[in-house]
Image (cartoon, rainbow, N blue to C red):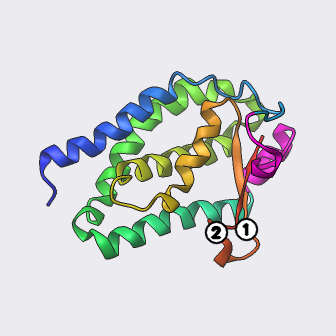
């Protein structure tokens, strides 16, 4: 079993992340051009909340989100079984930490008519990013799919899905969808 100090260190990583989440200017730049990236480096774009909801509820987006977790779980199972066994404890602690943030910060920033589906997507994306952060120092960078996606929230945009032509294409040849 992981020592109390190690466990606390992992939780502190996501606690700092959750503190940062509360300072973001949620959705302040949705629909605006992305000027900080070259065109070839930009994500696939949607331009309104209806399209954002479509992709946030699309099977392919949820498949990619689940695959991001599977990549991390598989790596831990093979390479650090001791920490892998703590997965459910971390999920529970992260969910407890995120719940009030979702209700007090994220949900009020969303248009009322799009709240439920998008809140589920955002909660899941933030939860998985928190898990990636918890295991960041033992898992390869290529597995940090959700952490890279949630950076868009910090910039005021909304990552709302992924496109991958085939299962073999995620994450290396997939494209993030951003509103």
Residue under label 1: 164
Which circle marks residue 15 in the picture? Answer: none
Quarter of the figure with the C terminus: top right
**Circles 1 and 2: CB distance less than 8 Å?**
yes
Q: Secondary structure at mark 2?
A: loop
Please provide the residue range marked out in magenta. 36-57
Q: Which percent across, then down, holds residue 11?
A: 29, 42
Seen from the viewer's position, the closer of residues 92 and 39 is 39
Q: Where does the N terminus fall, quadrant-wise?
A: bottom left
Callout count: 2
Q: CA distance from mark 1 to mark 2?
A: 6 Å
Which quadrant of the figure has residue 9?
A: top left
Residue sitting at 39 percent across and 61 percent down? 139
Q: Is residue 45 magenta?
A: yes
Mark sitting on residue 170: 2
- Is 120 positioned to the left or the right of 138 in the image? right
Of residue 134 and residue 102, the one placed in the foreground of this image is 134
Q: Position of residue 172 (x, y in %)?
A: 63, 66
Q: Is residue 120 visible?
A: no
Left or right side of 4 for 136: right
């Amino acid at each position: 079993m992981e020592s109390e100090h190690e466990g606390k260190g992992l939780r502190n990583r996501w606690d700092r992340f959750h503190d940062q989440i509360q300072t973001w200017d949620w959705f302040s730049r949705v629909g605006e051009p992305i000027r900080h990236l070259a065109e070839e480096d930009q994500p696939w774009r949607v331009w309104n909340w209806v399209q954002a909801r479509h992709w946030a509820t699309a099977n392919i987006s949820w498949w990619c989100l689940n695959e991001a977790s599977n990549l991390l779980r598989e790596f831990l199972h093979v390479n650090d079984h001791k920490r892998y066994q703590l997965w459910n404890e971390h999920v529970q602690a992260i969910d407890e930490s995120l719940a009030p943030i979702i209700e007090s910060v994220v949900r009020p920033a969303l248009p009322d008519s799009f709240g439920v589906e998008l809140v589920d997507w955002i909660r899941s994306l933030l939860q998985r990013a928190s898990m990636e952060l918890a295991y960041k120092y033992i898992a390869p960078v290529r597995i940090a799919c959700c952490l890279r996606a949630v950076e868009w929230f910090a910039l005021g945009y909304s990552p709302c899905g992924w496109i991958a032509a085939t299962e073999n294409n995620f994450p290396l040849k997939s494209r993030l969808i951003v509103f």
